[in-house]
Image (spheres, grey):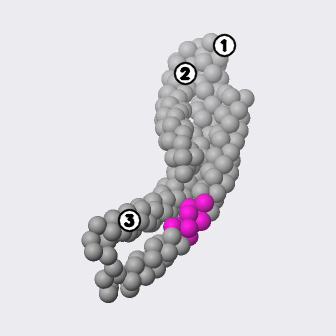
Amino acid sequence: IQWAIDAQDHFKVVMKALEDYQRHREGLAEAAQRLGLALQEAGQRATGRFGEALQASGAAQQRAAAKLEAHAADELHVLSKLRAHQGKVAADCRSAIRRYQAAKKELALLRRARAEAVTAKQSASGDSLITLPIEADAARVEEATQWRVRGAAEVVRAKLSMFEAKHKSDYASSLAAYLRSTSVEAEQV
């Protein structure tokens, strides 16, 4: 359970950093586009080789901006996969963990109530006619609750295993796509 909590906390940090990087990249693409246009316009006003150089530089800047925008779109795929993972799978895990914790609390409450009943019975005059049926019912309820706790624990273990596998798979593929995108972008720019 602690691993799932730690993984979700780490996930939130990574998501925030990737979202910040995405916004920064979009801003760079917009700035590169404006710079490319400004250089091309200046190149049209200038004469000779200097004007041609400005126009070529502006065109190169606009191509780089277009590639930045394309990579930004690719990165949206990375972020959307991580967001989907964070939302659906983590919520399912949290729900299973809550059911398990609720069953454990119920079992602890039943055991405490039985212990208090035994103490009260010992301080009183002893068994009554209804003591045996009540104790039998209490034992049945406690046993059923124990089975529910065991079942919930199995579900939690299974969901946490699936969560861990899904987390590692999505995390690895998303970061690989991100790294691929940034390395291609760096080469092209």
Q: Are marks 3 and 1 in contact (CB under 8 Å)?
A: no
Mark 1 and mark 2: span between their CA atoms?
14 Å
Residue 20 seen from this side: yes
In front: mark 3 or mark 1?
Answer: 3
- Asked if 107 appears above or below 66 in the picture, the reply is below
Q: Residue at x 63, y 59 (%)?
A: 162
**SS state under label 2:** helix
In front: mark 1 or mark 2?
A: 2
Q: In the figure, is residue 26 to the left or right of 137?
A: right
> Hey, which quadrant is residue 139 in on the image?
bottom left
Quarter that holds the C terminus: top right
The answer to which of 79 and 127 lies nearer the viewer is 127
Q: Which residue is mark 1?
A: 49
In this rendering, is residue 135 above or below 185? below
**Looking at the picture, how far across and down is residue 179, in whole percent?**
68, 36
Query: What is the magenta segment's predominant secondary structure?
Result: helix
Q: Nearer the viewer, residue 88 or 1?
A: 1
